[in-house]
Image (cartoon, rainbow, N blue to C red):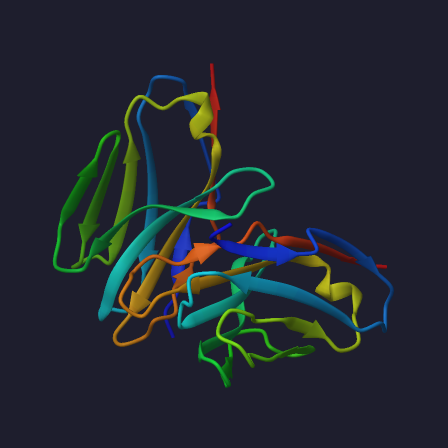
Amino acid sequence: DAGITQSPRYKITETGRQVTLMCHQTWSHSYMFWYRQDLGHGLRLIYYSAAADITDKGEVPDGYVVSRSKTENFPLTLESATRSQTSVYFCASRDRDNTEAFFGQGTRLTVV
Amino acid sequence: GEDVEQSLFLSVREGDSSVINCTYTDSSSTYLYWYKQEPGAGLQLLTYIFSNMDMKQDQRLTVLLNKKDKHLSLRIADTQTGDSAIYFCAVTSGGSYIPTFGRGTSLIVHP
């Protein structure tokens, strides 16, 4: 199916563990983004990417790592999860010539 | 960087019009968006306006842009219970392709 998909939809992990959130898009969009959504903060940009092998930090990158070896995938890794990283994470993609950013369904991550 | 502000809540009666407001800081803003987020779902683009426009209408939705005051609004006519959701204002500025989002406005529609 065409679109942008995130996995898993829900994840519970323990403090200190490494966890990777997956994002896959089928359109070959150049740009991809990771946001976190928290009450009172709206959407905050964690990392973004303009193309394969090009990534850059957003507003709240600490504690996260990304990679983009292929255009269609943009995984987000929490190297050592902390309770403050409990959040809903959204991946989005956008084509160079299109104004619309398309969002995945989100991953609800709970760190206990 | 760009700062986008929205009020957090709006409550309206079914059938009334809703107006959701947004202010932004960067005068070089190019595209201004309204996204809708239903419970448990991702964001979906409702509409957008380019900075050289003052108004855009799309069925029940009317977007007004006041560049002088850096103010964007979304009017929903004949609001229905299915319009209950969080509405996000987002802006891209200058040559940036990265949208900056507001905190979102929770629209509650009651009978």
Q: Count the numbered circles shown.
A: 0
Q: Name which residue lies at 50% across and 82% down.
A: A55
Q: Position of residue B88 (x, y in %)?
A: 42, 49
Point out the image quarter for the C terminus of chain A. bottom right
> Does B79 sit left or right of B111 as displayed?
left
Query: Is B5 situated above or below A45?
Result: above
Query: Is B75 situated above or below B21?
Result: above
Q: Position of residue A108 (x, y in %)?
A: 69, 53
**Is residue A66 at all visible to an observer of this figure?**
yes
Q: Closer to the camera, B99 or A107?
A: A107
Q: Name which residue lies at 79% across and 76% down.
A: A80
As drawn, which residue projects farthest toward the top?
B111
Q: Identify the image quadrant of residue B73.
A: top left
Q: Closer to the camera, B20 or A24?
A: A24
> Does A45 sit left or right of B55 as displayed?
right
Q: Identify the image quadrant of residue B27.
A: bottom left
Query: Is A53 situated above or below A108?
Result: below
Q: Name which residue lies at 42% across and 71% down.
A: A31
**Is residue B102 at all visible to an observer of this figure?**
no
As drawn, which residue projects farthest toward the bottom?
A53
Query: Is B57 situated above or below A110?
Result: above
Q: Position of residue B95 (x, y in %)?
A: 27, 76
